[in-house]
Structures are given as C-alpha cells and as structure tokens.
Image (cartoon, grey):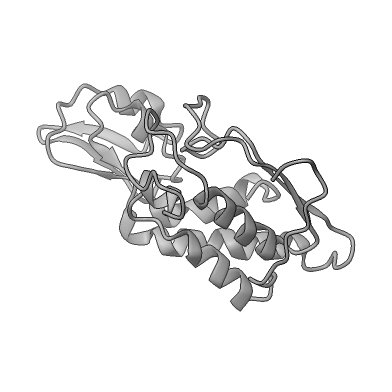
Amino acid sequence: MGCAAAPGKIEQHECVKPVIIEGCASCGTCIESCPENALHITDEGAKMNYDKCIACNNCIFACPNSLIKLNWDKMDEFIERMTEYALGAVQSKKGKVGYMNFLMNITPDCDCLPWSDRPIVPDIGILVSNDPVALDAASYDLVNHQKGFENSLLHHNYHEGQDKFKGVWDRVDGHLQLRYGREIGLGNLKYDLINIGSEI
C-alpha cells in the first residue's frame, strides 16, 4: 500500500467505507473530521453520503461513542485490492527488489494511524527475502509462535502457536493475503529460515 499514490490508496480503501450503527447522539464530531463533507446530521443521527466518502476512516476514530465502524463484510475485497497493488508496484522490477520485515514493536493497529499501542508479542528480529509472500508467511508464523502479551489489545490467543492477529481482529483472515498473493503471482508460500544472527 505504501507504494501507491494517494488516489491508489483511496481506491484500495473505498470498498470498506465506514458504517454508522444505531445510537448516534448527533454530536457532530465526525463531521469535523471528514475532509470531503460526506457526513451530515439528521433527526436520526449522522448520515453518510457514500458518493462523497473516500474511506479515509477519520470518522471512525473521531466518534466519541465508537458508533462508526469498518464495513467488515467487505474486508476480504480490501485485502485482495491491497495485494494487487503490491503486485503492481513490483511486477516490472523482477530481480531488482528486496524485502525486509522488522518483527519488532509489533503493535495491534495499522502503522498509518497517528498513535501506537503496546506490542502484542516480544521482539523477534529482522527477516529478509526476495519473495514478499514467503517473507510475510514466515513473519506470520514467527509472530504466532510467540507467547502474546496479556496486558495489550490482544484479546485472546495468547499461547504459542495461536493466531495473534485473530486475537486482535477476529474477523480478519491473515492467510487470505498470503494465499491471494500466491494466486496472482506475487510470490510463494514456502520458505526456509536461515538464522544469521545470535538469536531467532
């Protein structure tokens, strides 16, 4: 996603435009957060003009009552779009791109957010590969092999071998991105770990 221009980031996100759930108090805080003026207040609470919404999701984090949510029904489509953009960024650069994953300070939310939270697992190290799918598959497995931190936003799956990402986001399947990346030719799922440091 980081290699996409701003319009590309919008195109990736537009399928998960936020939804307003019942109980809105019409405080108007979300309206101030919207760069496209896609929200307005009615007698029944805030309403969204989806033709204007660019899915920046500012309103989700602005709502003081947490009544604006991601559209989880479209999350699989978002993951596929993100994977397609990753392929688009590198498909003309075969043999010229290397990949590094820093498995350190692994926090529960996207790094595009302006804040952070406590890590969900201990630091693991740095992984390097010329295959982004294999690299992410190895990273996913290594994170899940850790014992999770209980005083974090990890709600369950604390034990070694349990899926830490589902322990934070129940409705997100991290394997979907890996499988789809393999399907569209971004890389392969198989990997061999070669330890070149003192610890792994």
In the rendered image, the residue lying farthest to the right is 96
Taking depth in this image into account, of 124 and 96 the one nearest to the observer is: 124
In the rendered structure, the answer to whether residue 21 lies left or right of residue 34 reads left
In percent of the image, x 45 and y 53: which residue is there?
A: 14
Residue 161 lies, with reference to residue 63, above or below; the image says below
Viewer-side residue, 49 vs 21: 21
Residue furthest to the front in view is: 198
Residue 174 locus on image (x, y percent)? 48, 59
Q: Is residue 171 above or below residue 76?
A: above
Measured as percent of width and height from the top left, residue 48 is found at 28, 42
In the rendered image of this protein, does residue 178 appear above or below residue 151? below
Q: Could you tell whether 7 is left or right of 66 in the image?
A: right
Please state the total of marks drawn on the protein image. 0
* Residue in the picture at 42% in, 57% down: 15
Q: Where is residue 37, by image quadrant?
A: top left
Q: Where is residue 140 in the image (x, y as percent from the top left)?
A: 56, 55
Picture residue at 47% right of the left edge, 36% below the top: 120
Name the spot of residue 107 as percent of width and height, x first. Answer: 51, 35
Query: Which of 35/185 is in front?
Result: 185
